[in-house]
Image (tube, grey):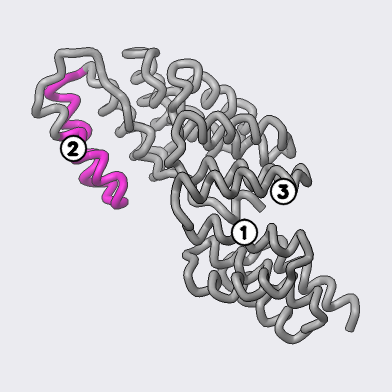
């Protein structure tokens, strides 16, 4: 469920808060900043050229080597990506970005244990490094270690309270742990911190549904199917399907579940609703 509800931070965000050992020529910094922007926009050709120029200006510019690694990761060249990131790590082990980048490579190679180890190494360098905290929490969640995941997301909202992913992860863990009473307090706190974000309103609707306030949940979910973006929109349709099923509205439940799966084909709640409808035909 968690994977369907989140939009994980862009790979290039791992460079936030980094600083190579001085002195770094201004032109190198300028080229690497451009490389980071190109990565964020998906322009890998320019991102590579700009990072390579940054390295020509400053061969020990750690962040530029990280950018080169991320370019190769996006291209699917995992061996080359790992080589660039290991070089960045060797240049400066006191930056979280190379450790986190290596975690991304391991995760893309489906070595989740190794990925988690790299994310945790990044957090040893900088406990407030949000991308590594998010990904560590996500991997714990994926493995069913909800308490471990909750701890990561709790730490994230403490150190970076404006990071929406931390609140979403924490709330999802609390639902998984069936701590509905705790959801209320944390959801109120999240809304005070970030405002009434539609992603948080989705959890408000789930909370209403869990308390038996079905019609209120239904009305809120109907608005969220329009207000939310993918993949959250899929979740809104899926929970609307579950609400309609509980109300005995079979046709509406089926339509909502199909809408959810049209956005996210493996959406779990929508799949469950369709399965239940099939069983009771």
Q: CA distance from mark 3 to mark 1?
A: 12 Å
Q: Position of residue 70 (x, y in %)?
A: 37, 36
Q: CA distance from mark 2 to mark 3?
A: 44 Å
Q: Which mark is residue 76?
A: none
Q: Nearer the viewer, mark 1 or mark 2?
A: 1
The residue pinned by badge 3 equals 175
Q: Secondary structure at mark 1?
A: helix
Circle count: 3
Q: Secondary structure at mark 2?
A: helix
Vertical order, 230 against 17 (above or below): below
Q: Position of residue 235 (x, y in %)?
A: 61, 63
Q: Nearer the viewer, residue 276 or 111?
A: 276
Magenta residues (range): 31-59
Q: Position of residue 127 (x, y in %)?
A: 48, 22
The residue pinned by badge 2 equals 50
Q: Residues within 10 Å of mark 1 (few under 14, many from 20)?
A: many
Asked whether, in this view, residue 209 is left or right of residue 52, the answer is: right
Q: Residues within 10 Å of mark 2 (few under 14, many from 20)?
A: many
Q: Earlier in the sequence, mark 2 or mark 3?
A: 2
Vertical order, 248 against 261 (above or below): below
Q: Nearer the viewer, mark 3 or mark 1?
A: 1
């Amino acid at each position: 469920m968690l994977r369907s509800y989140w939009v994980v931070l862009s790979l290039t965000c791992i460079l936030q808060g980094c600083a190579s050992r001085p002195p770094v020529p201004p032109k190198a910094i300028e080229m690497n900043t451009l490389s980071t922007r190109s990565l964020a926009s998906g322009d890998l050709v320019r991102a590579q050229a700009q990072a390579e120029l940054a390295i020509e200006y400053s061969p020990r510019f750690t962040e530029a080597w990280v950018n080169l690694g991320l370019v190769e990761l996006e291209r699917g060249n995992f061996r080359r990506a790992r080589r660039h990131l290991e070089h960045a790590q060797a240049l400066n082990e006191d930056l979280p970005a190379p450790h986190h980048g290596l975690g991304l490579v391991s995760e893309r190679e489906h070595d989740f244990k190794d990925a988690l180890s790299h994310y945790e190494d990044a957090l040893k360098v900088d406990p407030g490094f949000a991308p590594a905290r998010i990904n560590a929490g996500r991997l714990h969640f994926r493995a069913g270690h909800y308490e471990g995941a909750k701890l990561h997301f709790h730490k994230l909202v403490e150190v970076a309270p404006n990071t929406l992913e931390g609140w979403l992860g924490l709330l999802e863990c609390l639902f998984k742990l069936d701590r509905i009473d705790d959801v209320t307090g944390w959801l109120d706190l999240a809304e005070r911190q970030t405002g009434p974000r539609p992603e948080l309103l989705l959890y408000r609707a789930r909370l209403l549904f869990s308390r038996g306030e079905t019609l209120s949940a239904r009305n809120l979910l109907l608005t969220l199917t329009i207000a939310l973006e993918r993949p959250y929109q899929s979740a809104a349709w899926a929970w609307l399907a579950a609400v309609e099923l509980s109300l005995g509205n079979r046709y509406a439940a089926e339509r909502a579940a199909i809408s959810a799966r049209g956005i996210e084909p493996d959406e779990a709640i929508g799949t469950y609703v369709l399965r239940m409808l099939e069983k009771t035909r």
